[in-house]
Amino acid sequence: DVKVTQSSRYLVKRTGEKVFLECVQDMDHENMFWYRQDPGLGLRLIYFSYDVKMKEKGDIPEGYSVSREKKERFSLILESASTNQTSMYLCASSPPPGRGITEAFFGQGTRLTVV
Amino acid sequence: AQKVTQAQTEISVVEKEDVTLDCVYETRDTTYYLFWYKQPPSGELVFLIRRNSFDEQNEISGRYSWNFQKSTSSFNFTITASQVVDSAVYFCALFNSGYSTLTFGKGTMLLVSP
């Protein structure tokens, strides 16, 4: 069974803390993505990566960074958490288009609250 | 720029009613792919269907059916005889061929009451 696993379901952090959200996939996918989901705004792309050590900015990268040291792992970093980063964060992975356009597989989400 | 519009924010129905979720998209690509995902209360997005632009045949899977109309740039989703377990947020998404990313609509929350 294919799996995208996010390290935490719920997280509470203080303003100014450095926060790491971890995501691991076991499908040997090249592409990995981080989205945030907010009521009334749907899913918005933060960052994505096509391969190890590669990263691309999505639509809302401000206040975030990412790390991809291994193919299976894609980390989202909040350098200094702020209350407006309270949100649901969703990780996803997909194979490259060369293997045919398939769906992206999503993790269960991390609900982050910054207080 | 690509765009997906789900005009219905929330729909409430009673069990066994049929319900249609609307999706309208904008793209300059001549070949493109559309998706529907379901997000139950547990939070994980569950893939429902992928449709490419050169196949306009409508699709049925059990109680689910999809109506793809290129002329109106719409990809609507119908649930027949809805059930309480269909309660979820449903997202329509458009594949961005240049970046292999997905552009999502804002989602439609479906509430099915017994």
Image: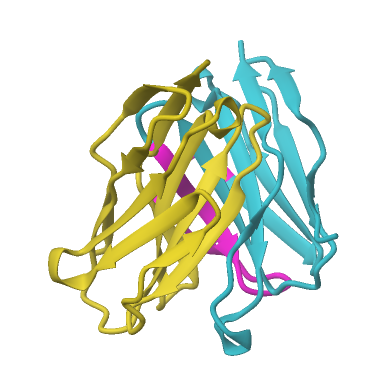
Chain colours: A cyan, B yellow
Identify the image quadrant of residue B38: top right
What residue span does the magenta drawing correspond to? A42-64
Residue A62 visible to the viewer:
no
Identify the image quadrant of residue A31: bottom right
Q: Is residue A33 left or right of residue B56?
A: right
Give the image location of residue B11, x and y in percent: 34, 26
Please tell me which residue lies in front, A96 or B53. Answer: B53
Please tell me which residue lies in front, A45 or A52. Answer: A45
Please tell me which residue lies in front, B70 or A56. Answer: B70
- Quarter of the image with the C terminus of chain A is top right
Identify the image quadrant of residue B30: bottom left
Residue B10 visible to the viewer:
yes
Residue beneath the point at 64% across and 25% down: A112
Question: In the image, is residue A23 part of the stretch drawn in magenta?
Answer: no
Give the image location of residue A43, x and y in percent: 45, 43
Residue projecting furthest to the top: A115
Residue projecting furthest to the left: B71
Residue beneath the point at 41% across and 38% down: A42
- Quarter of the image with the N terminus of chain A is bottom right
